[in-house]
Amino acid sequence: MAFCPNCGASVENGAIFCTSCGSSIQTNDGAPETPATPVNEEVVYNTPQTAPKARELNVAQLVWAIINIVLCCMPLGVAGLVFTIMAKDSPDDATEAKRLKNAKIFNIIATVGGALIVVFYIIYFVFLFSFSEYMYY
Ligand SMILES: [Zn+2]
């Protein structure tokens, strides 16, 4: 004896349509059609844990890199920026830490280098004006 998956009425084996409600029947060895297998809850709950964890973008490092790009050292600032963005997509904590460290190193070099350039310019102009004849009248 088979059962209608729609209304549950018993129907003859091999019947194509339910005599009670008229819906089509997939014969299933007499067992009532089981509802679709529920999604394995274990799998559902484990997926976020096995997937790479979402990482926050290091905004401070990013802003610093952009300041370096704008104010002084384009290539170094870009390197810092790239490493900062790459750190966000790291597969693990160690990689993230390494990339953030690289970003920091490039940012420090850019800032220190930029500061040195500014200092040299100041010294240069101070000397320039010191020896200019306008200073002697
Ligand atoms: Zn039926």
Image (cartoon, grey):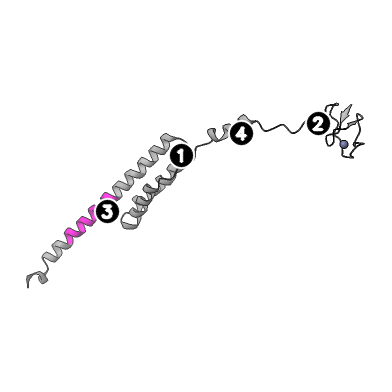
Left or right for 9, reference 62: right
Q: Classify mark 3 as within 8 Å of ligand 1 or not, answering yes or no.
A: no
Q: Nearer the viewer, mark 2 or mark 1?
A: 2
- Contact? badges 2 and 4 (CB < 8 Å): no
Q: Nearer the viewer, mark 1 or mark 4?
A: 4
Identify the residue position indicated by label 3 in the image.
114
Q: Is residue 122 above or below residue 38?
A: below
Magenta residues span 111-124
- Tell me the number on the disc at residue 33: 2
Q: Quadrant of residue 34?
A: top right
Q: Amino acid at mark 3?
A: Gly
Q: Position of residue 64 (x, y in %)?
A: 34, 50
Left or right for 28, reference 65: right
3D distance between C-alphas at marks 2 and 3:
74 Å
Q: Quadrant of residue 72?
A: bottom left
3D distance between C-alphas at marks 3 and 4:
51 Å
Q: Position of residue 113 (x, y in %)?
A: 26, 51
Identify the residue position indicated by label 4 in the image.
44
Q: Quadrant of the N terminus?
A: top right
Whereabouts is ligand 1, in terms of quadrant? top right
User: Mark 3 Cα within 10 Å, few/some/many (few <14, many 20+)?
Assistant: some
Q: Which label's residue is closer to the chain start, 1 or 4? A: 4
Q: Quadrant of the C terminus?
A: bottom left
Q: Which label's residue is closer to the chain start, 2 or 1? A: 2
Q: Which label's residue is closer to the chain start, 2 or 3? A: 2
Q: Classify mark 1 as within 8 Å of ligand 1 or not, answering yes or no.
A: no
Q: Is residue 82 above or below residue 30?
A: below
3D distance between C-alphas at marks 2 and 1:
46 Å
Identify the residue position indicated by label 1 in the image.
90
